[in-house]
Image: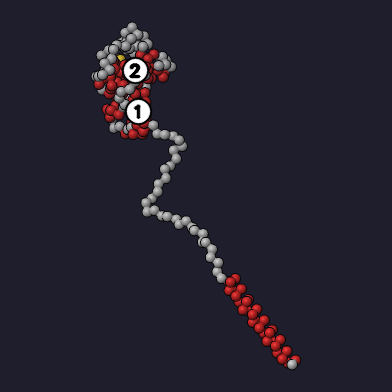
Amino acid sequence: MRSKVQWASVVALAATVMTALFSAQGSGAAANQPVLVAAKSETQTAFVSTPVVQSLPTDGAAVTDSQAEDATQSDPQDADSLAELVAMQPSGGSVDRQTRCLAGAIYFEARGETLEGQLAVGRVVINRAESGRFPASYCGVVYQPGQFSFVQGKHMPSIRESSADWREALAIARIAVEESWKSEADDALFFHAKRVSPKWRLTKIAQVDDHIFYR
């Protein structure tokens, strides 16, 4: 009897162990079952076949029409002759009083002469204004009493401003002021027509066309 009881206990114990085992395996399968997690999407980099050009900063400085025009103007150093340089000068626009006085002296003293002769006359007016020995402005030099015969009663005769001679005189005046072309009379302070002989005790520099120049 006792043996039967012991055997029954062993069988019951074995059944309990088997039940526990199967329960544990079921829990393990559930624990090891993969959990689906939403994958984080990554933005793909797109490539283009054409180059992308980024504009350069301009520091807020806009290019004006006048600056663009200055950039396209011919460099005076590119001129092969004085005539070519004259042709490069701007035409039209207003003329300030000092330039008008200088161009007027060129117009009345050397109109019809070569461009070199006109430039030499212009240089004399400029040299006088810068010398400290004469009035310190072009108009002061031109209107100084007894210096230029075309000045009558402190007035300059009327100028035919639509003429090619006046446009040429203005161009020569600008060239003389800018010293963009060398003249044979660059250092001259005086000149006279070669038809007269004033017997000046001065140093002769050059004769250009109908004028002789001195300093």
The spot of residue 148 in percent (x, y) is 32, 12
Query: Are there few (<14), some (14-19), or many (20+) residues within 10 Å of tag 1?
Result: some
Residue 19 coordinates in the image, percent (x, y): 64, 80
Give the image quarter of residue 186. top left
Q: Residue furthest right?
A: 2
The first of marks 2 and 1 along the sequence is 2
Front-most of residues 26 and 177: 26
Residue at the disc numbered 2: 100
Q: Quadrant of residue 164?
A: top left
Under mark 1, the amino acid is: Ser
Label 2 amino acid? Answer: Arg
Q: Is residue 11 visible?
A: yes
Residue position marked by numbered label 1 in the rendering: 180
Q: Give the structural element (helix, strand or loop) at label 2.
A: helix
- Cα distance between the residues tagged 2 and 1: 19 Å
Q: In the figure, 24 relative to 193: above or below?
A: below
Residue at (58, 74) in percent of width and height: 29
